[in-house]
C-alpha cells in the first residue's frame, strides 16, 4: 500500500514534468501549426539560464598564492566568490536560492529567444510543409546545442536546490502512517506544485483574457480568425514567446533533479512529442492529461512486481500506451479532427 | 507547366546515374571521400533514403521509425551468416523478406492513422524495438555489444572452410569488404534506383502521389488508399532491410543503436535535405550527411594548421580557431547550419538548387525558355 | 427502371433530426434535382448515398445493391461518382494525371500493384483520358498542375474525372456554386451534353435557373422531409414549395 | 554458393578483389600503401600514423576531448617535444624521443559518437584512407568491442581506451586488441574488502543496473565478491540506458528492506541516478539498524563533477587518479597540467599510457607489424606509468596492476579534487585466471 502510494506520487511528479514540457509544444502545434523540433532546445536553454545565473553569482575572484603550487607545478590560484565578498549574507542567500531566483533571468531571456526565433525564423515557415519545419527547427536545435556545448562543455553541470528544500520529506509520518515509508524529495514536490501553477496559469490566461480567447479561436479555426481582421500574426509571436518561456521555466526548475548538459533537450524531445500526440493534437487539456497518464503508468510499470511478470515493460511502456491509445482513440485523448492529420 | 520525363530521358538519367555511382572511387577521391568504407556508406544510405522516399516522397506519410527495418535487416543478415554461412546472397534475400514482413505488421497497424498520429505510431514501434533489442532481447541481438559472427557458429553451408579464414562475407571467393564490397553495394544501389525509377513512373507511383495529393478524392474515385500506402510502406521497409543487410555484409556487426529514433530521424533529414519526392535528392542528401559525419569530424587543429599553413601567422591562428568550431568535435554545428541554410534558401532541398541552376543556365543560353520543366527529378 | 431507391431513411445528429423518413426514387437516365432551403438535409442525404454517412434506419438501394455500410471506394466501383461543392481534385498532379487516375481505377479496380510499366505508355488509359480532356475543353492544359487552375476549370476537371469512369449514377453537389453567369452557362451546356450519354444524375442546386434547365424531376426537401416531388412544372406551382422557401428563392 | 572453399590467402583475395575494382579504383590503389608491404598500412615514408578514435559528440564528448588531449601530449613526447612526461619514468628505455622506429609519429582523429557503427566507420576511415597502423581510444565497452573486432578483421592493432567491461578482454578478446584499463572483475575484487571494512558484514543490497552487458557484469562481480561476507541481494533492477529520471526505480528501494544501494551505472547515468538517490534521502535513512549506504563501483572523476555534492563519501573504484604520488603519475600530471591548465582524467591517463606502450612495443619489435608488436606487448612487465608494476598478460591481452579504491572527498579543495584514494589494492588481489571469462584470442592478423 505504501509502495503504491509512493509510486502514485512519483507518477504524478513525473506526469507534472511531462505535462509541463508538452504544454508549450502543444501551444505551438495547436496555434501555429508548426512542428517545432527545437522545443527541446528551448527547455535546454532554460536549464542553462539557471546554470549561467549560478555561474554568474559564483564568479570567483582569482588571486595567485605564490607560496603554494599545484600538482603540476603552476602557482596555486585562490578563489573567492564575488557575491560573497561583495554582498555578504545576501550573497550567500542568493547563491543558495540560485535556481528559483534564476527564473527572474529566464523569463526575459526566454521571451527574447522566443520572440527572435518566431520573428526571425518560424514566421517564414507557417505556410511551408511540415517537412521543411522539421528540418529547419532540427537544424536550429543542433546549432543551439553546439553553442551551449562550446561554452559549457558536454558534461552535466550540477545545480542544487535551496537548502530549505534540499532533502526529502517524510510524508508517511506527516499523514500518520509509518515513519520512513513514504519519503519524497522536497524539490520534486516543489516542481509538481510549480508545474501545476504554470499549467493553471496558462489555462487561466487562455480562458479568461480576450487575448486567450482569440488564441483559442485561432486554435479551433485559424482561417476564420484571420478573416475577422484580427492581427493573428502578432498574437502568434506572443504565443510562441509564451511557449518558449514555459519550456524554459520547465528547464530551469528541472536542473536540481537532472544535472543539465547540452543534450538534455534532445533527450526530452521524443518524449514530449509522444505526450502531445497521445493527448491529441491541438488540445491543451489533452496534453496535460497524457502527461500525467504516462507519468503514472511509467512509474507503476517500473515496479519490480510488474517487471517480473513482464520483463522490459518499463522500457517500452510509454510507447506501448501511445500505440494503444492512438489505436483506440484515433486522435489521441482529446484531439480534434483535421489537425496535422495530413 | 510540368511534364514527366520521357522514357528515353529516364534511361539517360539512369545511365548517367549508374556510371556516376560506379566511378565514385575516381571522382570522390579529390575531396577525400574515395575510400571503400565511406563509398559503401554512400551506397547503403543512398538505398535507405531512396526506399524511405518511396513512402515519404510519394505518399507524404512521414514514418519516424524506419530505422527499425534497417535494424531488422541487419540482425537477419548476421543471423543468416551465423546459421547458413558467409554468402551475402541468402543474407540479402532473407533480410529483405524479414523486414518486409516486419513492415507489413507495423504498417498494417500504423496506417490506420494518418499525419502526425501515423508518425508517432511508427516512432513508438521503432523505439520499442530498439529498447527491447538493447536489453530483454539480448539473446537474439547480443544487446549493446552488437551481434557478430563467431567461429563457433554452425554456418551450415561453409562450415567446411572454417578455420582461420577471416569472418567476413564472401561471394565467389571475393571478400565483401573494401572495393569489392563497395561494388556489391553499388550494384544493388543501381538496381534499387532502377526499381524506384520504375515505381515513380508507374501507375502505382501515380496512385501513391494521388494518396499524398487528395485521399478524399481518391476514395470517391473508387480507389482504396490503404493497400497502396501499405504496399509503399512494405516496399520502403524492404529497401531499409536491404540497406541494413548491406551494412552487415560489408561489416558483419549489427547493433541496436541502428534502430534508435536518431537513426530514423537521420533518414528523414537525408530525404528532406536532398529533396523529397525526387529520385536523386535522397541519395545526394544521404551522401552529404555521411560525408560530413566522416570527413568533417576528422579534422583537428593539426590538419587545419596544415590546410591554412599558407596564411601568415597572425591570420592563421584566428582562421584555424574559427574553422575549428565547425569541424572535428564541432561537426554537428556545421550540419545544423547547413540544414537551416538549405531549408531557408532552397525549400525543395538540394535538387531545388540544381533545378534553379539549370533554369538560370537555360535562360542564359538563350533558350526560348517559357516552357520550363518543373523539377520532376 | 429505378436506379436508386431510397426508403425510410432517418438520420439524427444528437438531438437534431437531419433526415426524417426520406423516400426517393430515381429513374434511370433522368436528371433528378434535389432542392430545398439551407439546412434542409440535402448534403446529408447525398452523404448517405456515398458512404460518408450511415443512415440510422432505412435503405438505399442502387440497382440491386444496398449502398449502406459500403465504403466510399466500393460505392464508386459500383458505378456512383460524385462531384463536390468545392472541387476535390489532385491539386499537386497534372490535369492529365488527374484524369488518368479515375480511368485506371475504373479499369483496374480499387487496388492494383502495377509498379513496373510506365504510366505514360499505357496508351489505352492515355487516349481515353485525352479524349475526356478534349471533351471538357482542357486538352491544351493537360500538363498544368491542377491546383493552379481557375475555379471553373477545376470544376470541369472534376466533372471530367467523374465522367471518364462512365458512372451509372453521377451525384452533383451544387455544380455551379460560386460561378459567374458565363461559367454557369458553360457548365449547364456541358451537363446537357453529358445528358446525351444517358448517365443518370442527381443534382443538388440552389440556382433555380440551373435546376430548371437540367432536371427532369425535382424533389423538394425541407427540414429533413421530402415535401414535394414532381416535374419542374409541378414544382414551380406547388404552394408547399413556395412556403418552404418563404419566397426567398427566385422561383 | 561455394560449399568447399579453399582458404584463400589474404593477398590473393585482395588481388582478386582488385581485379574487379581495378579499372575504376586505380587512383586509390596507387596511393594506398596497403598493397606493397608485408603488413597492412606499413609506413613507407618518414612518418607513422596512429588513429585516435574518441567520442567528440554525445554524452562522453568531454571525456573524449580529454583523451584526445592525452594523445596529443603522448605524440609530442614520443617525438621529443615537451618535457617527455612519463617517458622519463617508464621502466622501458627503448624510446628515445625521436619518434618510433626512426619515424616521426603523426596522427589522425575521428568521432566515435559513442555508437558502434559510427566508431567503426571512423576507424575504417583511418585504416583505409589515412593509413593508420594502430587505432586507439573510446569511452565505452560496446564501442571498444566493436572497434576491436574490426581491427582484428582489418589487421591493425587496437589499443583500447576507457572500457571497463569484462568482455573486452574476456569473451570478446581478440589477438590484435590490448587493454590497459581495468574491468568489472577487478573492481569487484578490489572494492569488496574495503566495503567489508567500512560497512560491515551481512548487508541487504539493492542493485540498480544499467541494462546492458557492462552493467550486468558489474552487478555480477560485486555480488560475487560481497556474497562471501554475507551481503545478500534483495533485488537487482535493470534500468534503461539514458533513462534521465530514475525516480521510479528509486522509490521501490525505500521500502524494500535494503540497507545498501549499488549503482551499476556509468557516466551520465551514474550522475543522474546518484544525485537523485541522494535527493530521495536514501543516505539519511537508517535501515536494519544500519545507516543506508550507496556504492558506485566505477567512478569517473570527470563525470562525477556532474553529481556535485552527491558523491561525497561514496566508495568506488577507479583506474588511476591524478593525486597519486608515484613518480610516473606526478610526471604525467605535471606535463598535462602545464599544457592544459588542469589535471588529467583517468581516461586521459589510460589513453596516454596505451599510446606509449604501443610505441615502446613497436620500437622494441623494430617494426609496426601487428604480430611483432603484439608479441612485444605480450607478457610485458613494466613500471613507472602510474599504476605500479604492471603486466600485459599474454593469455588475454589484459593489463594487471594495482586498483584504486576511492571515496568522494568531503572537503574538496578544488573542482578537480573530488576523490580521495582510500586504498591501493595490490595487483595480486585482483588477478584471476585467464580462462575464467572464456573467449579466444585467435591469431594475429597483419592484414595481408
Image (cartoon, helix red, strand yellow):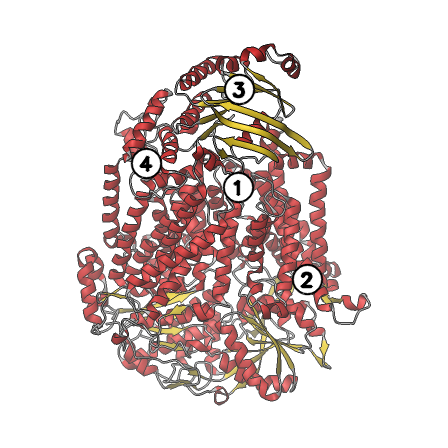
The residue sitting at 78% across, 72% down in the picture is: A179
Q: Is residue D161 above or below residue A56?
A: below
Residue B357's disc is 4
Kindly report the distance in space between the C-alpha atoms of the residues bearing marks 4 and 3.
54 Å
Kindly report the distance in space between the C-alpha atoms of the residues bearing marks 2 and 1.
34 Å
Pair 2/4: label in front: 2
Pair 1/3: label in front: 3
What residue does disc 3 label? C33
Q: Chain of mark 1?
A: A
Q: Are marks 3 and 2 on the same chain?
A: no
Picture quarter containing residue B187? bottom left
- Of the 4 image quadrants, the one containing the C terminus of chain D is bottom left
- Of the 4 image quadrants, the one containing the N terminus of chain D is bottom left
Kindly report the distance in space between the C-alpha atoms of the residues bearing marks 4 and 1.
35 Å
Q: Nearer the viewer, residue B14 or B337?
A: B14
What residue does disc 1 label? A341
What residue does disc 2 label? A10
- Helix, strand or loop under label 2: helix
Q: Nearer the viewer, residue C35 or B141?
A: C35
Q: Is residue B322 visible?
A: no
Amino acid at each position: 500500500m505504501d509502495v503504491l502510494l509512493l509510486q502514485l506520487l512519483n507518477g504524478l511528479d513525473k506526469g507534472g514534468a511531462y505535462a509541463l514540457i508538452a504544454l508549450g509544444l502543444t501551444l505551438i502545434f495547436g496555434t501555429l501549426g508548426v512542428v517545432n523540433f527545437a522545443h527541446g532546445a528551448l527547455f535546454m536553454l532554460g536549464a542553462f539560464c539557471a546554470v549561467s545565473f549560478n555561474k554568474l553569482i559564483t564568479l570567483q575572484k582569482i588571486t595567485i598564492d605564490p607560496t603554494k603550487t599545484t600538482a603540476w607545478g603552476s602557482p596555486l590560484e585562490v578563489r573567492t566568490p564575488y557575491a560573497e565578498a561583495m554582498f555578504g549574507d545576501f550573497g550567500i542567500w542568493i547563491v543558495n536560492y540560485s535556481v528559483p531566483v534564476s527564473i527572474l533571468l529566464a523569463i526575459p531571456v526566454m521571451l527574447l529567444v522566443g520572440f527572435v526565433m518566431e520573428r526571425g525564423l518560424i514566421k517564414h515557415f507557417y505556410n511551408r510543409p511540415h517537412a521543411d519545419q522539421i528540418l529547419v527547427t532540427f537544424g536550429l536545435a543542433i546549432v543551439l546545442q553546439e553553442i551551449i556545448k562550446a561554452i559549457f562543455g558536454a558534461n552535466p553541470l550540477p545545480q542544487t536546490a535551496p537548502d530549505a528544500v534540499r532533502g526529502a520529506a517524510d510524508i508517511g509520518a506527516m499523514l500518520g502512517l509509518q515513519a520512513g515509508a513514504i519519503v519524497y524529495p522536497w524539490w520534486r514536490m516543489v516542481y509538481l506544485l510549480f508545474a501545476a501553477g504554470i499549467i493553471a496559469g496558462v489555462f487561466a490566461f487562455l480562458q479568461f483574457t480576450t487575448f486567450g480567447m482569440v488564441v483559442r479561436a485561432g486554435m479551433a479555426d485559424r482561417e476564420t480568425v484571420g478573416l475577422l481582421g484580427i492581427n493573428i500574426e502578432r498574437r502568434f509571436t506572443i504565443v510562441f514567446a509564451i511557449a518558449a518561456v514555459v519550456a524554459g521555466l520547465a528547464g530551469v526548475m528541472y536542473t536540481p533533479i537532472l544535472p543539465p548538459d547540452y543534450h538534455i533537450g534532445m533527450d526530452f524531445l521524443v518524449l514530449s512529442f509522444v505526450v502531445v500526440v497521445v493527448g491529441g493534437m491541438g488540445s491543451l487539456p489533452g496534453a496535460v492529461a497524457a502527461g500525467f497518464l504516462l507519468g503514472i503508468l511509467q512509474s507503476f510499470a517500473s515496479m519490480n512486481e510488474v517487471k517480473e511478470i513482464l520483463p522490459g515493460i518499463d522500457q517500452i511502456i510509454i510507447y506501448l500506451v501511445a500505440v494503444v491509445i492512438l489505436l483506440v482513440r484515433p486522435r489521441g485523448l482529446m484531439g480534434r479532427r483535421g489537425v496535422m492529420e495530413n | 507547366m510540368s511534364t514527366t520525363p520521357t522514357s528515353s530521358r529516364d534511361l539517360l538519367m539512369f545511365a548517367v546515374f549508374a556510371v556516376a555511382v560506379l566511378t565514385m572511387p575516381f571522382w570522390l577521391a579529390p575531396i577525400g571521400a574515395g575510400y571503400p568504407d565511406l563509398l559503401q556508406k554512400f551506397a547503403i544510405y543512398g538505398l535507405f533514403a531512396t526506399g524511405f522516399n518511396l513512402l515519404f516522397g510519394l505518399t507524404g506519410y512521414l514514418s519516424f521509425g524506419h530505422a527499425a527495418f534497417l535494424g531488422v535487416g541487419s540482425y537477419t543478415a548476421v543471423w543468416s551468416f551465423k546459421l547458413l554461412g558467409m554468402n551475402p546472397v541468402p543474407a540479402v534475400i532473407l533480410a529483405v523478406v524479414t523486414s518486409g514482413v516486419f513492415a507489413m505488421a507495423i504498417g498494417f497497424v500504423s496506417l490506420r492513422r494518418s499525419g502526425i498520429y501515423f508518425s508517432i505510431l511508427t516512432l513508438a514501434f521503432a523505439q520499442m524495438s530498439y529498447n527491447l533489442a538493447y536489453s530483454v532481447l539480448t539473446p537474439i541481438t547480443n544487446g549493446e555489444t552488437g551481434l557478430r559472427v563467431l567461429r563457433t557458429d554452425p554456418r551450415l553451408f561453409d562450415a567446411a572452410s572454417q578455420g582461420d579464414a577471416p569472418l567476413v562475407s564472401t561471394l565467389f571467393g571475393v571478400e565483401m569488404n573494401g572495393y569489392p564490397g563497395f561494388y556489391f553495394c553499388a550494384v544493388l544501389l543501381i538496381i534499387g534506383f532502377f526499381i524506384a525509377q520504375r515505381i515513380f513512373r508507374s501507375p502505382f507511383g501515380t496512385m501513391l502521389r494521388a494518396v499524398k495529393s487528395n485521399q478524399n478524392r481518391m476514395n470517391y474515385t473508387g480507389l482504396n488508399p490503404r493497400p497502396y500506402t501499405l504496399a509503399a510502406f512494405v516496399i520502403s521497409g524492404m529497401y531499409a532491410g536491404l540497406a541494413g543487410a548491406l551494412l552487415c555484409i560489408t561489416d558483419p556487426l549489427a547493433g541496436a543503436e541502428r534502430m534508435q529514433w536518431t537513426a530514423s530521424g537521420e533518414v528523414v533529414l537525408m530525404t528532406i535535405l536532398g529533396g523529397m519526392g525526387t529520385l536523386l535528392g535522397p541519395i545526394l542528401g544521404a551522401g552529404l550527411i555521411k560525408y560530413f559525419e566522416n570527413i568533417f569530424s576528422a579534422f583537428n587543429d593539426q590538419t587545419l594548421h596544415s590546410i591554412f599553413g599558407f596564411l601568415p601567422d597572425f591570420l592563421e591562428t584566428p582562421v584555424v580557431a574559427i574553422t575549428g568550431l565547425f569541424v572535428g568535435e564541432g561537426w554537428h554545428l556545421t550540419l545544423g547550419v547547413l540544414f537551416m541554410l538549405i531549408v531557408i534558401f532552397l525549400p525543395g532541398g538540394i535538387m531545388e538548387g540544381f533545378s534553379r541552376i539549370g533554369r538560370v543556365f537555360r535562360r542564359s543560353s538563350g533558350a526560348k525558355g517559357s516552357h520550363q520543366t518543373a523539377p520532376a527529378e | 427502371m429505378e436506379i436508386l431507391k431510397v426508403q425510410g431513411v432517418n438520420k439524427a445528429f444528437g438531438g437534431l433530426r437531419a433526415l426524417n423518413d426520406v423516400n426517393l426514387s430515381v429513374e434511370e437516365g433522368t436528371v433528378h434535382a434535389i432542392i430545398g432551403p439551407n439546412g434542409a438535409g440535402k448534403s446529408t442525404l447525398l452523404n448517405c448515398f456515398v458512404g460518408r454517412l450511415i443512415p440510422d434506419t432505412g435503405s438505399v438501394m442502387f440497382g440491386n445493391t444496398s449502398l449502406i455500410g459500403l465504403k466510399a471506394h466500393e460505392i464508386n466501383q459500383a458505378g456512383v461518382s460524385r462531384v463536390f461543392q468545392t472541387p476535390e481534385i489532385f491539386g499537386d498532379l497534372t490535369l492529365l494525371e488527374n484524369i488518368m487516375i479515375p480511368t485506371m481505377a475504373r479499369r483496374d479496380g480499387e487496388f492494383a500493384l502495377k509498379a513496373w510499366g510506365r504510366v505514360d505508355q499505357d496508351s489505352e488509359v492515355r487516349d481515353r483520358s485525352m479524349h475526356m480532356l478534349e471533351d471538357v475543353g482542357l486538352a491544351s492544359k493537360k500538363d498544368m498542375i491542377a491546383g493552379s487552375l481557375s475555379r471553373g476549370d477545376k470544376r470541369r476537371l472534376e466533372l471530367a474525372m467523374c465522367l471518364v469512369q462512365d458512372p451509372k449514377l453521377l451525384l452533383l453537389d451544387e455544380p455551379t456554386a460560386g460561378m459567374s453567369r458565363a461559367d454557369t452557362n458553360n457548365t449547364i451546356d456541358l451537363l446537357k451534353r453529358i445528358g446525351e450519354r444517358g448517365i443518370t444524375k442527381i443534382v443538388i442546386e440552389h440556382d433555380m435557373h440551373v435546376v430548371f434547365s437540367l432536371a427532369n424531376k425535382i424533389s423538394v426537401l425541407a427540414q429533413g422531409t421530402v415535401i414535394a416531388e414532381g416535374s419542374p412544372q409541378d414544382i414551380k406551382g406547388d404552394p408547399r414549395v413556395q412556403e418552404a422557401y418563404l419566397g426567398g428563392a427566385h422561383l | 554458393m561455394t560449399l568447399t572453399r579453399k582458404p584463400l590467402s589474404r593477398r590473393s583475395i585482395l588481388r582478386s578483389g582488385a581485379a574487379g575494382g581495378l579499372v575504376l579504383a586505380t587512383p586509390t590503389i596507387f596511393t594506398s600503401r596497403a598493397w606493397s608491404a608485408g603488413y597492412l598500412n606499413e609506413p613507407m615514408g618518414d612518418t607513422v600514423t596512429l588513429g585516435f578514435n574518441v567520442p567528440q559528440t554525445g554524452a562522453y564528448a568531454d571525456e573524449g576531448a580529454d583523451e584526445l588531449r592525452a594523445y596529443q601530449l603522448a605524440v609530442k613526447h614520443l617525438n621529443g617535444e615537451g618535457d617527455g612526461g612519463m617517458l622519463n619514468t617508464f621502466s622501458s628505455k627503448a624510446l628515445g624521443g625521436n619518434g618510433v622506429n626512426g619515424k616521426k609519429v603523426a596522427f589522425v582523429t575521428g568521432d566515435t559518437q559513442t555508437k558502434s557503427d559510427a566508431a567503426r566507420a571512423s576507424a575504417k576511415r583511418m585504416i583505409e584512407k589515412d593509413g593508420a597502423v594502430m587505432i586507439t581510444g573510446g569511452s565505452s565497452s560496446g564501442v571498444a568491442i566493436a572497434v576491436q573486432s574490426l581491427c582484428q578483421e582489418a589487421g591493425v592493432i587496437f589499443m583500447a581506451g576507457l572500457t571497463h567491461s569484462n568482455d573486452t578482454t574476456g569473451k570478446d578478446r581478440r589477438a590484435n586488441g590490448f587493454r590497459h584499463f581495468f574491468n568489472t572483475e577487478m573492481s569487484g575484487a578490489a572494492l569488496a574488502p574495503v566495503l567489508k571494512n567500512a560497512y560491515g558484514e551481512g548487508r541487504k543490497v539493492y542493485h540498480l543496473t544499467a541494462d546492458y552487458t557492462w552493467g550486468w557484469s558489474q552487478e555480477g562481480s560485486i555480488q560475487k565478491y560481497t556474497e562471501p561476507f554475507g551481503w545478500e541481494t534483495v533485488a537487482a533492477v535493470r534500468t534503461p540506458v539514458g533513462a534521465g529520471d530514475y525516480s521510479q526505480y528509486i522509490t521501490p528501494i525505500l521500502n524494500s528492506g535494503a540497507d545498501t544501494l549499488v549503482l551499476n551505472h556509468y557516466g551520465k547515468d551514474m550522475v543522474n541516478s546518484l544525485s537523485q538517490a541522494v535527493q530521495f534521502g536514501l543516505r539519511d535513512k537508517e535501515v536494519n539498524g544500519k545507516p543506508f549506504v550507496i556504492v558506485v563501483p566505477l567512478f569517473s572523476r570527470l563525470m562525477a563533477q556532474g553529481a556535485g555534492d552527491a558523491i561525497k563519501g561514496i566508495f568506488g573504484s577507479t583506474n588511476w587518479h591524478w593525486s597519486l604520488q608515484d613518480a610516473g603519475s606526478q610526471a604525467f600530471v605535471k606535463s598535462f597540467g602545464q599544457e592544459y591548465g588542469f589535471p588529467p582524467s583517468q581516461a586521459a591517463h589510460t589513453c596516454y599510457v596505451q599510446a606509449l606502450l604501443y610505441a615502446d612495443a613497436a620500437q622494441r619489435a623494430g617494426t609496426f607489424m601487428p604480430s611483432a608488436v603484439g608479441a612485444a606487448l605480450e607478457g610485458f612487465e613494466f613500471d613507472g606509468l602510474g599504476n605500479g608494476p604492471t603486466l600485459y598478460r599474454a593469455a588475454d591481452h589484459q593489463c594487471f596492476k594495482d586498483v584504486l579504491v576511492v571515496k568522494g572527498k568531503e572537503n574538496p579543495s578544488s573542482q578537480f579534487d573530488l576523490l580521495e584514494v582510500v586504498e591501493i589494492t595490490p595487483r595480486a588481489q585482483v588477478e584471476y585466471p585467464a580462462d575464467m571469462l572464456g573467449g579466444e584470442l585467435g591469431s594475429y592478423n597483419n592484414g595481408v
